[in-house]
Image (cartoon, rainbow, N blue to C red):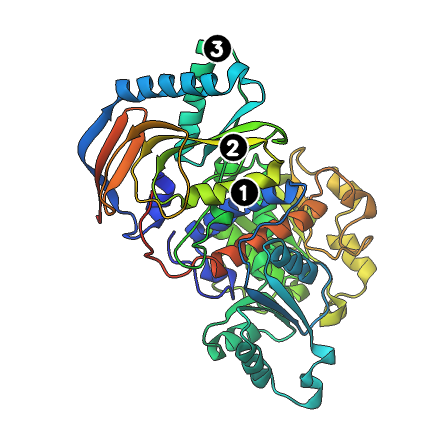
Amino acid sequence: MAERERSHTRPRGAVFVPRAQVMSAEDVRRATTRMAHEIAERNRGLQHVVLIGLQTGGVGIAQRLAEALAEAEGATIPVGTLDVAFYRDDIGLRPVLPEAVTDISFDLTGSTVVLVDDVLFTGRTIRAALNALGEYGRAQVVELAVMVDRGHRELPIRPDYVGKNLPTSRDEMVDVSDEGVSLGELVSR
Amino acid sequence: MSAFPTHLLSMEDLGPEEITEVLRVADSFVEVGRRANPKVPTLRGRTVATLFFEDSTRTRMSFETAAKRMSADVLSFAAGSSSLKKGESLRDTVETIEAIGIDSVIIRHSSSGVPARVAEWVDHCVVINAGDGWHQHPTQALLDLYTVRQALGGGDEGLARLEGLRVAIVGDIRHSRVARSQIAAYTAMGAEVTLVAPSTLLPPSLEGWPVASVSHDLDAVLPKADVVSLLRVQSERGSGAFVPSLREYTAGYGLTARRAAVLQPDALILHPGPIVRGVEIASDVAELPAALITDQVSNGVAIRMAVLFLLLGQGPAGGALRD
């Protein structure tokens, strides 16, 4: 969960208290490199491939994947960012705010879009992202890359590229950054 | 987000944090407005009614465009063709609106305080003040702030530059709801407001107004101003009677080409519209790059989308946590 969103979710201003680190910075780097190779393997030549990072947790990972693809394949992959706040299905049910402005400066029509997020949980963010994506052109294929798949899906959505499958309980929190992945809880200050 | 009010009645209901939130959310709606299909499903199933008891072009169109771009259903209520003509009271009209199941009423009225009164009557309907008498016009002040922040670089950088900004509000302060909202908005963000008007167009007392200074000499204020915000001489509110003649008003307080020449090179000129060319602003001055009048109008849609989103789209706090 992204920092800004966390600050708007009850308990308001709660802080993430890590309990266990499940991936080190090195693990995250290796997983990124592996996912980049998987993306290149599945989309031979990487023609028409674009990466779209979901605001805010997926943005850095999308950037890192693009760098890994540049290094491994010598390919320059366009990177965009997408905020899905206006497409969520829980608007009016809980506080929802845009985290940052969407930035997709290229037409997606005909492209292979790899959506990138940090954590895949219920799948509702991805559902919203699929709807939002349609505003920027008709992608030929949409794939999904996540650093952590923590289970508990509420929609028929599955990732194509996964950094790590991490069994969690519903009330745990997963925190993803370049420094690694931690499992913990949100605690009110 | 801190406490965003249930209704938007006055700029004074919003602190710096809430204002910042509106401006930030508006950035996302500006992006929506740039798309080939500038529509999002955010307020699907919500119904918004505009209840205008006073003439308006831009505010009404702007609110209705904003609501439609968010997929809300919009009802346009014209006081002139309603049951008010048959003698129905405002209170009964409002109860009818609520019984129909409308989620938000956007009200403009020539009497100060009407939106606040309506807000006391409603149970679940969100009330938005689109201008009441001399009192307040909060979305106008918000879109002014947005436009200035945008001209100062946008984002957090533009926001930070609002601090200490020298703003001159020129014209009919006395009858202006826009001025009252602007003063609250600019000072909340740390800007310094100077009012410039003949004493007849100032309110009888400025006690408690958070303004840095008051001047009757526009020529002395202009070279030091970062933002010049002009107000219309409101003949429908009788402000014409407070000046000897419009010509004399222009001679003392109109932004003529000669006066615009003494402005700092990066000074900004704002006007809430409708502009009366040749009175408060010369036609040539309104066309200068420094004049942000059309930016104000286009930003108005995004600001009103942000306001509708923050008032209608939030729901009770404390839904399920998610990643």
Q: Residue at x 62, y 60 (%)?
A: B178
Q: Chain of mark 3?
A: A
Q: Secondary structure at mark 2?
A: strand
The quadrant in which residue B75 appears is bottom right
Q: Looking at this rendering, what residue extends furthest in the bottom direction?
A: B87
Kind of residue at disc 3: Glu
Kind of residue at disc 1: Ala
Q: Chain of mark 1?
A: A
Residue under numbered circle 1: A132
Quadrant the C terminus of chain B occupies: top left
Characterize the local packing of mark 2: few (<14), some (14-19) or many (20 or more) Cα atoms within 10 angstroms: some
Mark pair 2, 3: CA separation:
21 Å
Q: Is residue B163 visible?
A: no
Mark pair 1, 2: CA separation:
12 Å
Residue under numbered circle 3: A73
Characterize the local packing of mark 1: few (<14), some (14-19) or many (20 or more) Cα atoms within 10 angstroms: many
Characterize the local packing of mark 3: few (<14), some (14-19) or many (20 or more) Cα atoms within 10 angstroms: some
Residues A88 and B35: in front is A88
Q: Secondary structure at mark 3?
A: helix
Pick whichever of labels 1 and 3 is earlier in the sequence: 3
